[in-house]
Image (tube, grey):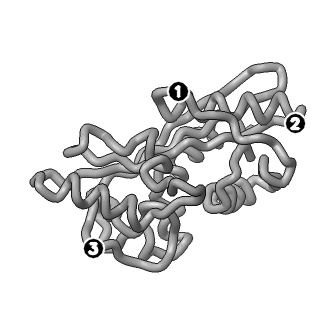
Amino acid sequence: MASHNAGKVAENAALLAEYGIGIVSARELGLPVPEETEATFLGNATLKALAAARASGLVALADDSGFSVASLDGAPGVHTADWAELPGGGRDYAAAMAKVHALAAPHADRAAWFTCALVLAWPDGHVEGFEGRAMGEWVWPPRGPGGFGYDPMFQPAGQGQTFAEMDKAGKHAISHRANAFRMLAEACLKG
């Protein structure tokens, strides 16, 4: 798994377990974190997957995902983690959620979505990419102890709970990551 994000690694590991596939993270392999220079989730996921596949000699799965708010023209989007970045290192998602709230609150439109791009890359440079979304709205104040990142302020369409209030199985059934994973599984894992 071409990721150093423990939350993403755990969610992808749970999704892959159904297929009898175990993962090792880029962090566990001591791989560097490539700079994300692309303007799209698929572009950044491709960059990360290819870097990990070439460095490890293994098939690599990369995930680039983020939170977008309609009234902010899709921001934070591919800069989701950057909005939480602390000057001395680390991330503060409570501050990032407060920033989203401060900028979006003056607008009536509460539409928001999570996007997840999953890319499988082989050491020879072959890639397969898939993008899933979970549509919903941002809520304030944040609710729930679970999940990670912006999960406490995102309520998926048709649900009465935020991602952070849902149990893992409930979130996995409808999340952006699960939607992308279903596409990946259909194309690459069933046979």
Of the residues under marks 2 and 1, which one precedes in the sequence?
A: 1
Q: Is residue 164 visible?
A: yes
Where disc 1 sits, the SS reads: loop
Q: Secondary structure at mark 3?
A: loop
Amino acid bearing label 1: Glu
Inter-mark Cα distance, 3 to 2 = 42 Å
99 is higher (above) or lower (below) than 184: below
Q: What's the mark number on residue 56?
A: 2
Label 1 sits on residue: 38
- Give the quadrant of residue 184: top right
- Determine which residue is flagged by label 3: 141
Q: Nearer the viewer, residue 169 or 96?
A: 96
Kindly identify the residue that appears in the image at 75 percent across and 30 percent down. 51
Residue shown at the point (52%, 54%) measured from the top left: 87
Residue at 26% x, 66% y is 139
- What quarter of the picture does the C terminus occupy? top right
Mark 2 vs mark 1: in front: 1
